[in-house]
Structures are given as C-alpha cells and as structure tokens.
Amino acid sequence: MKSELIDVSPTRKEIKIEIEPSQVRDTYDRISDEFIKKAKIPGFRDGHAPRSVVRTRYKNEIRTEVLRELVPDAVNNAIVEHSLDTISEPDVHFENEETLERLGEEPITVKVAVEVVPEITLGEYKGLEATRKTRPITDEDVDKAIDSWREASAVMVPVEDRASELGDTVTINARGNELSGPDGEPITDGEEIKVDDIEVILGGPNVQKEFTEHLTGVKPDDKKTFTVEYPADFSTPQLAGKKVEYEMEVTAVRRREVPEVDDEWAKSIGEEFDSVAKLKAKVKEDLEAQAKLESEDRLKSELIRKIVAAHQFEVPQSWIEKQTNQRFESILRDMMQRGIDPRKQQVDWEGAREELKGQAQEDVRATLLMDHIAEAENLTVSNEEIEAEIELMAQMSRQPIEQIRAALTKHGGERSIAQRLRNRKALDLLVENARITDAEWNEANESNEASATASTEPDEASAAATNE
C-alpha cells in the first residue's frame, strides 16, 4: 500500500491511497474461494463450481467483500502512518471506479478526506492585562428589588363596590363570529370562536384597544357585544387581518393589590426578617454578592477574548456546526420554556443561525486553548471533584443523583464534566496570573457595551385579546 498526504488546510487533509494489484489479487482469490465453498450453481456439484463461473454469478457480492476487507484497513493504516489526529469519519471516494470491474489487474486508488485537530502553538497566556469593574449597589437598586418582591406578593382582589377601571383584570367568556377575512371579503362559513375564562388587563400594553374600550365600566354578569378588527401582523395567525364580532359575558372583575412595605410584610418574607431594615440589609448584601459574580464573569470574558484574539487558527468545520446547533437549540429551548412558540415568530431563522456561527467558532477556539493551557500546566480533575459537580447538578435540577448519573453514563457525560472542570481550572489560572486593574464603574459605558452584544428575541402571542 502506498499513501500520499495532501494538506488542504490546517484542519482538512486528503490522503491518496494506492492498493497494489498483488494485494488485491490475493484478497480477491481468497474471497472467491470462500464463495466457491458455499455456492450452489446448477450443473455443478456444491462447492466445486469453477472460480470464473462463481465470480460471474456473485460478481457484486464478491467485489463488496473485497473492498470491505481492503479499504477500511488501508484508510486506518494511512491515518496512522501520517500521524493524523482525526475528529470525523473519513470521507472515502474511489478515484477510478472502472478499476473495480477488473479486480487485481490495476491498483485500487482511493481518496480520503478527513478533519483533524489543528496544531496550536501556545503563546504567552500569563500576565494578560484586564480590568475589573464592579457595579455599586445603590439604595435605588435595593428599592427596586423590594418592589419586585412586593409585586410577587400581590394578590387579586374581587372588585365589589364599583365598575371596572383601567388596570383591573376582567374575566370573560367570549363567543365570536368572523365577519371578514384579511382581504376584506365577507366570511359566511367561518368557525365560531369559543373561549372561556379569558383574563383581560384593561389598558394592558398588549391588549386590543376594543377590549379595553368595551370592558371598562362593567360588572360581573354584564354582557357586551362589539367588533374587533385585528391587525394584519396580529400574533395569532388564525385572527390576523380579520374582523370578528364578539358576544362577551363578564364573570369577574378583580384588581391587583400590592402589600405595603412594613415590618409585618417583612416578617412574611422570612422568619429572619423582623423589620424592613433587616430585609433591606439582606437584599443589599445579596445584590452586592451578585454584582461581584457578574464582575468576575466580565473579567473572565475579557481574558478569554484577549487570548483568543492572540491565537488565531483554523477551527474544524464539524465542531463549528456542532456548537452552532447547540447554541441554536439552546435559544429555541429557552423560548419554549418561556411559552414562546418559535414557529409563530416572523424571524429569519437561517440568518440567525448563520450569525451564531461566528460566536460558535470563538467558543470552539476558546475551548481548544483552555485544553492546551490545562495540558501545559498539568491540570487534573479528581473523582471527588466530578462527584461534587454531579451533586451540584442534581441540586440545581432538583433531580436525584442516581438519575443525573444514569443520564451522564448514557451520554458519556462524566468525561465532558471532567473536561469542563479542567478548562475551568485553566481559566482560573489565567485570572490568577493576570495583571488586573480595578476601575470605577461607568453605567453609561457598561450599558452601551451590553446593548452592543445583546440579542433581541421575538415575543409570543397566545390569546385573542393580546398581541404580545
């Protein structure tokens, strides 16, 4: 066997393999003889048919077995010969398929394309300069957090002494008939719309104006009939552009009641809070701890950006595709967990996926660099550290450890956990050896930087009365 390595790029290689006729003939003869022993051909005793007859009768089967025996070994031997660290299944093509019709008369020439791990030469990774900026926590931040807790503690109270007003929640049973479609043509056979227990927040930002206008000033058991003209871009496709006449029955009117900030309310939050002052002190402490974590995350991100910028190398396309898919699936999964149906959004998903490729490439490049730093520093991960990480995963997901371990075993996850922990140690090493300068927080600069990297996700639409 002869082989020649062709450098297509740092991550893509081609191998031209030539299998000599003598090796092909030996294999061809041996496999032909094995077929002779099993062949049942009319006119010949079992196992005694001439080789030429058997080769004609079982031509395709014999050729398949010859290639199945010769080619994989030749490819594997060539990969070993050229010391290639492959990361994908070889893509094998026969250079001249006509030679397969004359096995043993000419060499079999195969071209193999493979992806390989790029060679990376680590530059300086210690002593990188970075800036740590920690957002200060103000009394306004504490008050906002307290207000969020108050909002979470709010209760819906029935309105009994007056009619509905803006801000109230009106619960209705609705029956609707479609009057015209998006083209303005009358609809005579439209399906009746039946929805019960729909909650409409009067004046809400995503509530159709007709609902707010006609349901303001109502009381339970009131009935209303009115027409709604839905915009062409309405979030529910079945209603977009249509005119619908509704008959509504009001079943409840409620208002949202938010508790006052006093010591009694503070005690309801937790036994350790016997006053608003203690609650605020704890909130400030938690916010400061969160701000510190965010500061460290920004610092690590800056170091990663710098080391990636200093080490530009080609990244295997298959890894980029895999990471792009993971990022894309993560976005879709997050949307669905928040009740957003991606299929109903007017989004250029192909374009969005292409944008993710650039981020995915940097992700892979950073991971490879962390691997090399960990290797250079002889960083290791113990079984105890892996077990601790699994326990943490179980706590965060609220699943039994046995269930987490079973899922990890099925998908080879413990190895990925070890790699993640090892890379985390490499990143910690970058921080420990960096030249870090503490700088004053500038809200305007940080907000601009955040908005430059933030992604916009579509909202969801879920009810006839809203266009979220």
Image (cartoon, rainbow, N blue to C red):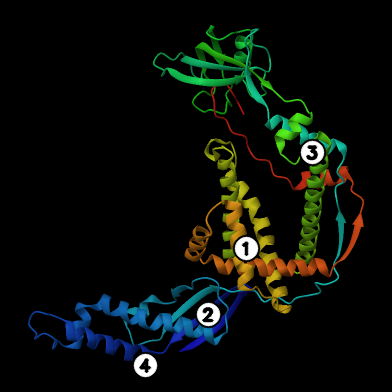
Mark closest to the chain's N terminus, 4 or 2: 2
Residue 93 at x, y percent in the picture: 44, 73
Quadrant in which residue 62 is drawn: bottom left
Label 3 vs 2, first from the N-terminus: 2
Question: Which residue is nearer to you in this view: 99 or 12?
Answer: 12
Q: Nearer the viewer, mark 3 or mark 4?
A: 3
- From the viewer's perspective, is the residue at label 1 or at label 2 nearer? 1
Secondary structure beneath label 4: helix
Q: Which residue is mark 1?
A: 389
Rounded to the nearest angstrom, the CA distance separating label 1 from label 2 is: 42 Å
Please state which amino acid type lies under the numbered disc 3: Leu
Q: CA distance from mark 4 to mark 2?
A: 21 Å
Residue extending furthest left? Answer: 43
Can you tell which of label 3 and label 2 is closer to the viewer? 3
Callout 1 touching callout 2 (CB < 8 Å): no
Sequence-earlier tag: 3 or 1: 3
Say which amino acid is labelled 1. Glu
Residue at mark 3: 279
Residue picked out by circle 2: 15
Above or below, 187 against 68 in this view is above
Amino acid marked by disc 4: Ser
Q: Which label's residue is closer to the chain start, 1 or 2?
A: 2
Distance between the Cα atoms at labels 1 and 4?
57 Å
Helix, strand or loop status at disc 1: helix
Where is the C terminus found, in terms of image quarters? top right
The residue sitting at 34% across, 88% down in the picture is 104
Residue 22: mark: 4
Determine crowd level at label 4: few under 14, some 14-19, many 20+ residues with C-alpha closer than 10 A.
some
Q: Are marks 3 and 4 in contact (CB under 8 Å)?
A: no
